[in-house]
Amino acid sequence: MKATKLSAHLTSNDNYFKVIVTLKACFSPFGSLTEGIDGQELAEVMVTWVNTKDNELQAELATRIVKILWSATTEQVAKVEFGRWDICLTTPTSDRKIRLQRYSGGYHVEVDFGPKGSESVAGQILSRAERSYVRFEAYNDQEHIERRVVIESLLQKAKNYLSFLTNRDKRDFDYDEMQDAAKEISFFERAE
């Protein structure tokens, strides 16, 4: 299942931690946002940024966000754009955009994969989000992808991964990894 965009609307009633979990799911496949970076801290500072009306605090938070991004142990770091009520991170190698917006009714988190879209990265984000009880809407261009299709795709990916793990050389056997894959399958079977 290829997606060009993932979008999650979180109402003001959704707690602060759900927004953090949503952002961390978005960061997970990108080395420039995970390697050497504290994703929890980055997400918390981003949410604080969009919630504050204090210009001095926003200036401090902007500096802190840049420092966090520059702490990445990768060769390139993510770009950041600041708006009055939003922040957009752009990954350096793939130009994927992760945007957090604040509006009167809550928050909007969006991942834009560009016109070519993504299958594997979108799947990683959707899988992590679903297991944290966050629902993204998936789109291919402007066409909405039905939730049933998303869940079926995630379930098939989990089954394929478990099959890969069970068929590889016994010297590489990792019981914990297999158990995690089986749990993921069970989760997505129940989600259907």
Image (spheres, grey):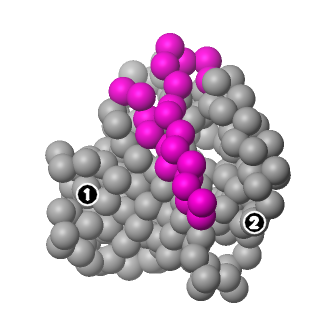
Callout 2 touching callout 1 (CB < 8 Å)? no
Q: Which numbered disc flags the more N-terminal residue, 2 or 1? A: 1
Q: Nearer the viewer, residue 105 or 5?
A: 105
Residue nearest the viewer, comparing 12 with 136 = 12
Residue at 50%, 14% in the rendered image:
75
Q: Nearer the viewer, residue 77 or 151?
A: 77
- Quickly name the residue at label 1: 3
Q: Residue at x 53, y 25 (%)?
A: 77
Q: Label 1 neighbourhood size at 10 Å, few (<14), some (14-19), many (20+)?
A: many
**Magenta stretch, residue numbers:** 72-93
Quadrant of residue 12 in the image?
bottom right
Q: Quadrant of residue 185?
A: bottom left
Q: Is residue 146 left or right of residue 164?
A: left
Q: Residue furthest top?
A: 75
89 in magenta? yes
Q: Secondary structure at mark 1?
A: loop
Image quarter (top left, top right, bottom left or bottom right) of the N terminus: bottom left
Residue at screen point 73% across, 36% down: 63
Marks 2 and 1: which is nearer the front? 2
Residue 133: % across, % down: 58, 71
Indicate the position of residue 53 as horizontal and vertical percent values: 75, 66
Residue 66 in sight here: yes
* Residue at the image point whose x is 67% and y is 68% from the top: 18
In the foreground, 51 or 24: 51
Q: Which residue is mark 2?
A: 53
Specify the farthest residue to the front: 55
Residue 107 percent coordinates (x, y)? 58, 72
